[in-house]
């Protein structure tokens, strides 16, 4: 019998734009190994060791509505309302993680060559989706307060991009949080151009100083918007639940895209999430505990970095979220550094995959602090700094010989 050729299937043209996620590749290389991993964006599993999930009633075993369970939509809409968004259950759609919301929005908005503006650096898996749909990606650098509103204005005029994707609150990967003023200015620019805002906000509840300013979408007066939220970082990511809330005129098409994609999100998971989020006081208490737990980890990481990285890199201390972003003083091959650290049981994320191909990337490292125990942080950061220092010294030697 003839063995079918693996190359005979004629694939859609867009598949050549399909990139794998470097973060997921690193994660799969480190699975089942005793490894200190700063690479992913994983919550701390010790937090749910004793968690008892609510029992799911058999009624939730049946197929359900594509928009999601009304009880969960109501809870999430109320929460979004408290942030200043005009949200009701009727413009809230439950998604299979906020990642699915990004995918549905990309299907709604992007054709090959559609200009789209995002941050540099930006969330890796969003770049992956937008590239698959063959958008023409334009980026704006993020400074301490966010992207520059004047630069956004100029780029919108130049590209006529119909949409902008931003992760303004404890951004993945940079950890930056846009100031209130920037948020208001960016909303005004978007209103002026009539540009749709995709705002991705999974880290909002995890803050270490003061609560972050309201979402940019809450300041929009006329521009359309889609706001993505998630329960992954504050409940458990394995539920695979998120939500999108949007301008009412976008809702029906997004709902049909959801139907075509998976009919509806997991109902037992929705039941569990609705039960766990129903009591606001309980929710607030859980989040406070979470913030305290991660604040200690953020502080331990800062201590380890101050000890080992001061001569190698600069960084800002994140006021929320799960990441430090280091800008190295001297460029090196970070994939070579990764091979070295993996041999010694430490994983991290080189910064380059968080940039689109076109823009200037510098030499940066993303470090996740939510997963690793404070005990292992110093050991892991020392191994990482040794690898970076060795490569920096080696490249200095080569330069001076040349
Ligand atoms: C910025 C950002 N958006 C979206 C997601 C996807 O989250 P989920 O699909 O688990 O809700 C993540 C996950 O790390 C993220 O960092």
Image: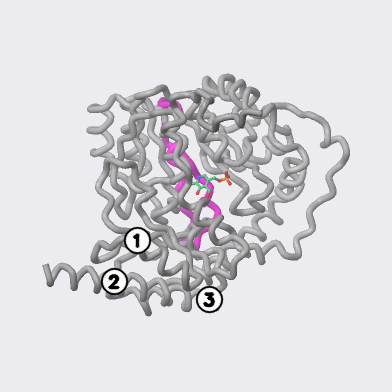
Q: Secondary structure at mark 3?
A: helix
Question: How far apart are the alpha carbons under marks 2 and 1?
Answer: 13 Å
Report the front residue among 380 and 175.
380
Q: Secondary structure at mark 1?
A: helix
Question: How far apart are the alpha carbons under marks 3 and 1?
Answer: 22 Å
Query: How would you rate the neighbour count of disc 1 (Cα within 10 Å): few for under 14, some for 14-19, many for 20 or more?
Result: many
Q: Residue at x 28, y 63 (%)?
A: 332
Q: Secondary structure at mark 2?
A: loop
Q: Can I make out residue 262 in this image? A: yes
Q: Which residue is mark 1?
A: 334
Q: Which mark is residue 376?
A: 3
Please provide percent x and percent y for residue 342: 47, 67
Q: Is residue 244 above or below residue 36?
A: above
Please provide percent x and percent y for residue 201: 50, 45
Q: Residue at x 44, y 40 (%)?
A: 19
Q: Is residue 72 above or below residue 366?
A: above
Q: Is residue 309 above or below residue 266?
A: below
| Quadrant occupied by the C terminus | bottom left
Query: Which region of the structure is painted magenta?
Result: 197-224
Q: Is mark 1 within 8 Å of ligand 1?
A: no
Q: Is residue 318 left or right of residue 1?
A: left
Q: Which residue is mark 2?
A: 312
Q: Is residue 97 above or below residue 233?
A: above
Q: Can I make out residue 198 in this image? A: no
Please provide percent x and percent y for residue 308: 36, 77
Please provide percent x and percent y for residue 307: 37, 79
| Quadrant occupied by the N terminus | top right
Q: Residue at x 39, y 55 (%)?
A: 174
The picture quadrant where one finds residue 78 is top right
- Residue at the right extreme of this rendering: 58
Do the residues bearing badges 3 and 1 touch, measured as CB atoms within 8 Å?
no
């Amino acid at each position: 019998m003839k063995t079918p050729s693996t190359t005979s299937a004629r694939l859609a043209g867009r598949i050549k734009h399909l990139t794998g996620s470097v973060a997921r590749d690193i994660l799969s290389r480190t699975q089942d190994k005793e490894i200190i991993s700063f690479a992913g964006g994983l919550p701390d599993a010790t937090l749910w060791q004793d968690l008892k999930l609510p029992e799911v009633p058999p009624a939730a075993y049946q197929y359900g509505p594509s928009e999601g369970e009304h009880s969960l939509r109501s809870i999430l809409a109320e929460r979004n309302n408290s942030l200043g968004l005009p949200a009701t259950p009727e413009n809230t759609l439950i998604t299979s993680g906020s990642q699915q919301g990004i995918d549905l929005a990309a299907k709604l908005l992007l054709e090959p060559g559609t200009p789209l503006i995002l941050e540099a650096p930006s969330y890796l898996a969003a770049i992956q989706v937008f590239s698959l749909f063959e958008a023409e990606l334009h980026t704006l650098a993020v400074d301490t307060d966010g992207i520059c509103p004047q630069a956004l204005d100029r780029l919108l005029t130049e590209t006529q991009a119909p949409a902008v994707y931003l992760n303004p609150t404890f951004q993945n990967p940079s950890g930056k949080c846009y100031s209130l003023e920037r948020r208001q200015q960016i909303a005004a620019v978007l209103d002026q151009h009539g540009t749709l805002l995709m705002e991705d906000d999974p880290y909002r509840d995890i803050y270490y100083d003061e609560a972050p300013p309201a979402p940019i979408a809450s300041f929009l007066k006329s521009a359309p918007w889609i706001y993505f939220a998630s329960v992954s970082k504050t409940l458990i990511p394995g539920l695979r639940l998120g939500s999108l809330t949007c301008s009412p005129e976008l809702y029906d098409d997004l709902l049909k895209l959801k139907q075509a994609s998976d009919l509806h999100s997991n109902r037992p998971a929705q039941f569990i999430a609705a039960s766990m989020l129903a009591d606001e006081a309980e929710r607030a208490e859980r989040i406070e505990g979470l913030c305290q737990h991660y604040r200690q980890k953020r502080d331990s990481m800062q201590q380890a970095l101050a000890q080992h990285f001061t001569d190698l890199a600069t960084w800002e201390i994140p006021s929320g979220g799960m990441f430090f972003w280091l800008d190295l003083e001297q460029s090196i091959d970070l994939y070579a550094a990764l091979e070295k650290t993996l041999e010694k049981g430490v994983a991290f994320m080189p910064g380059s995959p968080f940039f689109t191909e076109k823009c200037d990337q510098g030499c940066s490292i993303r470090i996740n602090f939510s997963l690793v125990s404070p005990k292992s942080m110093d050991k892991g950061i020392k191994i990482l700094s040794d690898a970076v220092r060795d490569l920096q010294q080696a490249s200095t030697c080569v330069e001076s010989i040349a």
